[in-house]
Amino acid sequence: MAKINLLGAIDVQGLEIVAHAEKPLLRNLGILADFLNFQFDDGADMWDRLKTANFGLFTWINGEFRESPKLWKGSWKDGALEEVRLSKAQLLYDVEGLLSPQHKLEALGVIIETANRMLKPSWYVSDEHGGVVKRAVPCDSFQQFLYGTLAMALEDDGELFKLKKCQHCQRFFIAEKFVERATFCSKGCRRDHHDGNGKAVQRAKASKDFARKKFKRDALKILSNYKSDDESDKKIEKVLGERKDDFFSMYEAIKAGYPKEKVWTRASNWKKASLKKLIDAGL
């Protein structure tokens, strides 16, 4: 993948900069949102579904993680599907923290620290309007693109406030009209959420309750069955980074004989989010 300036646009080949892109940062946020929404698998039709969902996202994934990308054929490179799923789990964890008032400040610190570690922005003089100073953020990997987009959208004049999570279907979307009031990704979701009989609300509640119970069951299973060794501990650290202690404190408590229900009840939502991140990463 050629180096891409986050302020530029990818052309149909995905390799060059188009300087006249309209709202490039908003377009990049759209790619980020679709990345969080898309279900990556090893099915034969996955690549066609990805191309249809977001061509810009397809261009990145196809170019970096797929065999024979120039021919647009072939499957994942060895270990690439797991790498993409892990990147998605990490980004989802950070973005949901960012959208949560309780965890926003901590998530901000993690995102900016990650962006600073990955990227090296530079400033240059453009000849537009007689000379204008602009900032370029080159990136040559999809991970750099994701965190560079987040960091730029978080600046004072950024557009992160347009990134929303639908109250009904839980998908991420970019709000371009009535941004402050936008809580649904489509009219259909708004209608289903507020239908006259309340059936959609009941279904959503039932689905949420089921998901909550399943998450608890899967999380406690990970804590109960975990076998600590160098290889396993490194996997935990790779997924959670500095948040690894959230997992190990709960694991050690259960290992010491504390009832699992008590450990779960006393765990903060932030600690439980660490377990969700492990589940999303397939551990």
Image (spheres, helix red, strand yellow):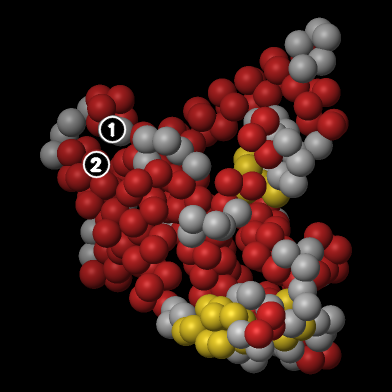
| Vertical arrangement, residue 159 with respect to residue 117, above or below | above
Residue 108, image x and y in percent?
Answer: 39, 53
Q: Residue at x 79, y 31 (%)?
A: 189
What is the secondary structure assignment of the residue under circle 2?
Answer: helix
Residue 178, image x and y in percent?
Answer: 73, 36
From the viewer's perspective, tell me whether residue 39 is left or right of residue 93: right
From the viewer's perspective, tell me whether residue 61 is left or right of residue 54: left
| Vertical arrangement, residue 72 with respect to residue 264, above or below | below
Depth check: 213 or 226 in front?
213
| Callout 1–callout 2 Cβ contact below 8 Å | yes
Nearest-to-viewer mark from 1 and 2: 1
- Residue behind mark 2: 250
From the viewer's perspective, tell me whether residue 109 is left or right of residue 209: left
- Residue behind mark 1: 267
* Residue density around tag 1, few if under 14, some if 14–19, many if 20 or more, within 10 Å: some
What is the secondary structure assignment of the residue under circle 1?
Answer: loop
Residue 180, image x and y in percent?
Answer: 64, 35
Q: Residue at x 39, y 63 (%)?
A: 112
Quarter assignment of residue 30: bottom right
Q: For the residue marked with disc 1, what is the amino acid?
A: Ala
Q: Residue at x 18, y 39 (%)?
A: 253
Q: For the residue marked with disc 2, what is the amino acid?
A: Met
Q: Residue at x 64, y 47 (%)?
A: 162
From the viewer's perspective, tell me whether residue 215 is left or right of residue 266: right
> Would residue 94 be seen by someone viewing this image from the given angle?
yes
Check the picture and name the quadrant holding the N terminus.
Answer: bottom right
Residue 186, image x and y in percent?
Answer: 81, 37
Depth check: 153 or 254 in front?
153
Check the picture and name the quadrant holding the C terminus.
Answer: bottom left
